[in-house]
């Protein structure tokens, strides 16, 4: 099938322009990051470019008013900040494809789980400014948690730019690369742990006679309120938990049941399993 770069809105390749942001891959997380930038007014729709093999995901970017193409190389030629938002196994194919267009002015940011900074730097021209980021699903509603790690050639201005652009998506922190896989097990996968807990909370209320829709809404609000208290008070979760408990009250009796079920140990094991799996992906 004929490539549709021109017909999809980019036209002939242009010189790299500062201030343009590209996404190689146009899936859910790429769309979430782009939406956060747009809502905050950090980037104009016409300065966001996205590529994907088919139109399935590009429709979303077109709906934002962004420009789209089927050519990864074309995105790289038009943008100085390029997000690699493909599946991890596609990265070793994509990087040699875009490498001829990567210049010292480029910042390349990988969103792919398990792909190390070393791998990225080896497959791109020497001296390329490379960073890794790991977002999570709530970035879609600007309540995400993003962890950044910089490569050997990325400097403070590059990290500052990325933080400014990503902060509308939620919490954005920098850490050593060794923390990225832990973040995957904690926050990337952790969203699913929380959904499972929210479901269990609501089902417990349904068991006791509350309508399901109301139970789900109250469970979600309970999790939201508890999380905000941790962030806004800065208190350790154990301190806040103890503040809810009264001698002989309902909470301590309920917590006893959670302890019988080894809730804390099970959650810790889940984070460990998620982290180890992310590390395994990085060794392939």
Image: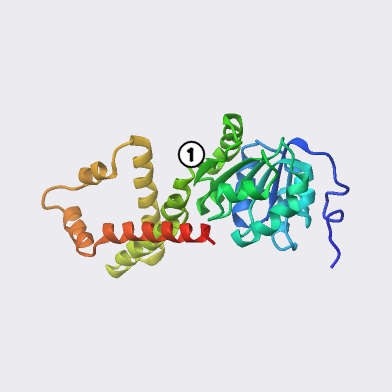
- Whole-percent x, y for residue 265 in the image: 27, 59
Judged from this view, the residue extending furthest toward the bottom is 207
Judged from this view, the residue extending furthest toward the left is 248
Look at mark 1 in the image and give the residue it sits on: 173
- Residue at point 77%, 45% (across, down): 101
Looking at the image, how many numbered discs can be counted on the residues?
1
- Residue at point 57%, 32% (across, down): 160
Figure check: 278 above or below 41:
below
Q: Is residue 46 left or right of residue 282?
A: right
- Residue at point 28%, 41% (across, down): 236
Figure check: 201 above or below 117:
below
- Crowd band around label 1 with a 10 angstrom C-alpha radius: few (<14), some (14–19), many (20+): some
Quadrant (top left/top right/bottom left/bottom right) for the C terminus: bottom right
Visible in this render: residue 77?
yes
Figure check: 73 above or below 149:
below
| Residue situated in front as seen by the camera: 109 or 27 | 109
């Amino acid at each position: 099938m004929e490539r549709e770069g021109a017909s999809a809105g980019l036209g002939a390749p242009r010189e790299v322009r500062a201030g343009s942001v590209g996404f190689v891959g146009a899936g859910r997380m790429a769309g979430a990051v782009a939406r956060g930038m747009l809502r905050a007014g950090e980037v104009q729709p016409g300065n966001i470019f996205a590529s994907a093999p088919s139109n399935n995901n590009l429709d979303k970017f077109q709906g934002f008013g962004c420009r789209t193409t089927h050519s990864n190389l074309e995105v790289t030629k038009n943008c100085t900040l390029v997000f690699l938002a493909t599946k991890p196994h596609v990265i070793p194919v994509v990087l040699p494809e875009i490498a001829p267009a990567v210049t010292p002015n480029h910042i390349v940011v990988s969103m792919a789980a398990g792909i190390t900074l070393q791998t990225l730097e080896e497959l791109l021209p020497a001296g390329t400014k490379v960073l890794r980021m790991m977002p999570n699903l709530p970035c879609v509603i600007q309540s995400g948690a993003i962890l950044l790690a910089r490569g050997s050639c990325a400097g403070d201005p590059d990290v500052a730019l990325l933080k400014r652009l990503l902060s509308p998506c939620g919490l954005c922190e920098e850490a050593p690369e060794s923390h990225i896989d832990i973040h995957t097990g904690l926050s990337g996968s952790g969203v699913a742990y929380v959904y499972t807990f929210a479901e269990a909370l609501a089902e417990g209320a349904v068991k006791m006679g509350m309508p399901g829709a109301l139970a789900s809404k109250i469970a979600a609000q309970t999790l939201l309120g508890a999380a905000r208290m941790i962030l806004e008070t800065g208190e350790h979760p154990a301190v806040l938990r103890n503040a809810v408990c009264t001698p002989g009250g309902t909470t301590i009796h309920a917590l006893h049941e959670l302890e019988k079920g080894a809730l804390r140990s099970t959650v810790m094991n889940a984070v460990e399993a998620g982290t180890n799996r992310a590390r395994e992906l990085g060794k392939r």
